[in-house]
Amino acid sequence: MKIVSIVPGFGGTFYCGNCLRDSAYVQSLRDAGHDAMILPMYLPLTAGLEPKDDGLPVFYGAVNIYLRQQFPLFRHMPGWMERFFDSTPLLKFAAGKSGSTRAKGLEKLTESMLMGEKGFQHKELDHLVEFLKHHQKPDIVHFSNALLLGMARRIREEVGVPVICSLQDEDVWVDAMEASWVDRIWQLMAEKGRDVDAFVAVSSWFASIMQDKMNIPQDKMHVIPIGVVPEQYIVTSPAASPQAIGYLSRISEENGFEVLMDAFILLKRQPRFSDLVLIATGGMTGDDKPFLNRQLQKLDKMNLRHFFTILPDFNTGNLPEFFRNLSVLTVPVLKGEAFGLYQLEALASGVPLVQPQLGAFPEVIGLTGGGVIYHPNTAEMLASKLAEVLSNPDRLSQMGLAGRRSVEDHFDSRKLTKRMLELYLQVAL
């Protein structure tokens, strides 16, 4: 089959589980013998791309769509100016700015994007439809998330192919908007969802959330989780000397990094954890840096800075070494997540999890047996649960092995790709 996957780019400045998922999925389709292409939206998608992907246009370039939305003068800019604002250096510069990754202040732009041909970005939609019709006529178009639904009707009707839409963490974006906009955006997404042939949620928990928010019929909803290729991860025993807590995600307040930092400080007050270290990676955007500095000041005040290692320049190539040094991984996201790719990456490496009882975390840990859950999501409770598991090395090893086996049995991306292809065939008939 010929499949085009349309995904938001992120510029490579931080660990974006959804972006990494999309890149890995397209590669899995190619490995299975299918003609799969990934088309980045907004910003360059630097993770997991092959050389043959170089030079692909970035549709709906972030600078262009923002200017069209904010300033009427730019809605009729000449072609040379559009190309300048879509240039790779300019888009990578935009990727490092907080505004490109946060919903607050982008309510009108989100609405305009969902309005498709009636929005201010209709010229970008014209370019995308023309590209699909004349340069890359696919059998299936697959959207990475429901915030792209404004494109569905024209693609479905003018390109003449089924449209599939994955669902993962759209609520994080929409529910962070100004309160007066939240219901309005969800209603618009529900309306545009009627133009989609099938939805694919990454967890049963998130499927139920999105069915409620978008009024998705049961026969349109499917659950196919994220997967990884187990052989790409080196299995090691949880680190014992010294023991180490790991964090893999964008280093930000909403991803719970402050909860972890406070829990780590609490643990260091106990003599039995005198050698315990904390290792973090995942990158950040511009306005995450003041937040990180405040956390570092806490360590300095307690004279604990030398027990903390941060890998600030996030690179997926460094992950094998990162996991090899860990005893346990925790990413205490304040509101939970629809799945969390980092969980599978840790488990595939034999590293157990300690996660809050939020979102799909209980579902993933329940399915894998590779970790434990705690509640509520406070520094005190996280410290207590970490102390419990770190004090039992045998249990850590058992959870690490169970997690790895579960990844092999249930979260192998090749098996999950087959399930997705079955869905493609179903909607294409």
Image: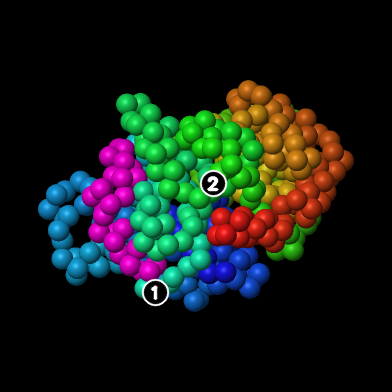
Residue annotated with mark 1: 135
The CA span between labels 2 and 1 is: 26 Å
Residue 61 is drawn in which quadrant? bottom left
The quarter of the picture where the N terminus appears is bottom right
Q: Position of residue 90 (x, y in %)?
A: 30, 62
- Visible in this render: residue 361? yes
122 and 9: which is toward the camera: 122
Label 2 sits on a secondary structure element that is strand
Asked if residue 272 lies left or right of residue 195, the reply is: right
150 and 300: which is toward the camera: 150
The image shows residue 99, relative to residue 390, as above or below, that is below
Residue 332 is drawn in which quadrant? top right
- Residue 131 falls inside the magenta stretch: yes
- First reached walking from the N terminus: tag 2 or tag 1: 1
Q: Position of residue 66 (x, y in %)?
A: 26, 50
- Residue 375 falls inside the magenta stretch: no
**What residue sits 47% from the left and 40% below the top?**
170
Numbered range of the magenta stretch: 105-133
**What residue sits 56% from the left and 55% below the top?**
427
| Label ID, residue 199 | 2
Q: Mark 1 belongs to which amino acid?
A: His
